[in-house]
Amino acid sequence: MKKLSITGVRVLSFLVNSFEKLFLSQDTFFKIAILIFSLVLSNLLFEVQSSYALKPTPSLSVSLLSAANIEINSDDIFNNPGNSISSPILFNVKTNNSTGFYVYPEIEKPYFMDITNPANSGKINNLTESDTYSHLTDLPENTFAGTKDCSPDHLNQLMTGWRSMPQIGATINSLQISQNTPTTDTGVKECFALGLHISNNLPVGTYQNKIIITAVANDYRTEANLISDSEFERKIASLLTAPVDSFNEIKHFERSLTAPTEATTVVHLEINEISDRTVLAWLDKDTQTLYYYSEAEKLYLNPDCSDMFSYFGVEYLDLRPFDSSKITNMNFMFANMYDAKEIDFSHFDTRSVTDM
């Protein structure tokens, strides 16, 4: 049985490691070393039956575009207005997920702390969560912050919107960037920036913290798109043999909660190229029931549903499992159903129908 899913797709990327302030002497000569590592973790779990080539599996990838090792010397900071500096972290996100992705940075600790001298109480603290600054120079001294006001194609532009950087596990992340559509084949450039405002009186030391940037695929509902009416009729007709040898002899049309056995004769009702999962149909002649089964969360009826259930001998037809929003032609869709007593249209959507 074919299975395909992307449950909980998560890509953990860019362990931005070792923000080190190396104060080499008392005259405040130092440098900041930024080491950026790329780590990609994915739990895409899928199984595809080789004889049926379904649409491409949703995927998500991230690649670092900034230099992997960045050094900022003391002159770089103290020659800037207000003893402040920003360091953009540039990366590329690529996904074919139809619902897009979101990406956000997190910090391991709310401060940069001296890792070489336990007696050193000096810290570079995260900006207070409730504060927002338009300009980096306005930050309190010995403070860092983050912003998503970072244009990948204009990295030298003045950045605003400096905020506290959320710690790992934060429920709200104000620096999150999101996109609700797939990217192009080459992906989309994104960036965050880390900003620091340093004073001359920060004690000598090596100050370190970690930043983790995480990209996640937006929730994705697996789907299957059904074949057109003519194909539907042809495939169902191939199942008809005595004593159920006509559409009128089909007395029940039901979704099965379990897959058919390997010995069962089945037909495929999905369009392979645009479906994540199969839709299998088979006929139980003892009960005169046409069953269908799919693991897809969404079952889209074909735009052409003309004559689809025409001459079916069912008394009750439940259409609730199907999404009908793509139907344009439902001409004679329920024609000549002489035994029908009830059709459940409670979830039926005719917004796209042009021929009824």
Image (cartoon, grey):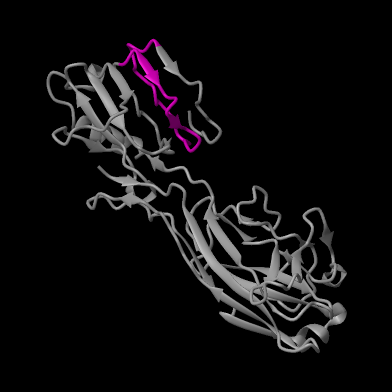
Q: Nearer the viewer, residue 216 or 95?
A: 216
Q: How many marks can you see?
A: 0
Quarter of the image where the N terminus is located: top left
Q: Is residue 262 left or right of residue 114?
A: left
> Residue 324 lies in magenta, yes or no?
yes
Is residue 273 rendered to the left or right of residue 185? Answer: left
Mark yes or no: residue 93 visible. Answer: no
- Residue drawn at x 34%, y 45% as measured from the top left: 271
Q: Is residue 282 left or right of residue 349?
A: left
With respect to residue 328, does 147 lie above or below? below
On the image, which quarter does residue 299 sit in? top left
Task: Farthest residue to the front: give it.
Answer: 119
Q: Quadrant of residue 293?
A: top left
220 or 211: nearer the eye?
A: 211
Residue 103 percent across, percent down from the top left: 59, 59
Residues drawn in magenta: 314-341
The vertical placement of 114 against 267, above or below, is: below
Is residue 307 toward the left or the right of residue 157 in the image? left
Name the spot of residue 44 as percent of width and height, x first. Answer: 40, 54
Name which residue lies at 18% across and 30% down: 239
- Please report the residue visible at 79 percent of the width from the left and 86 percent of the height from the top: 28
In-front residue for pair 137/64 = 137
Q: Quadrant of residue 76?
A: bottom right
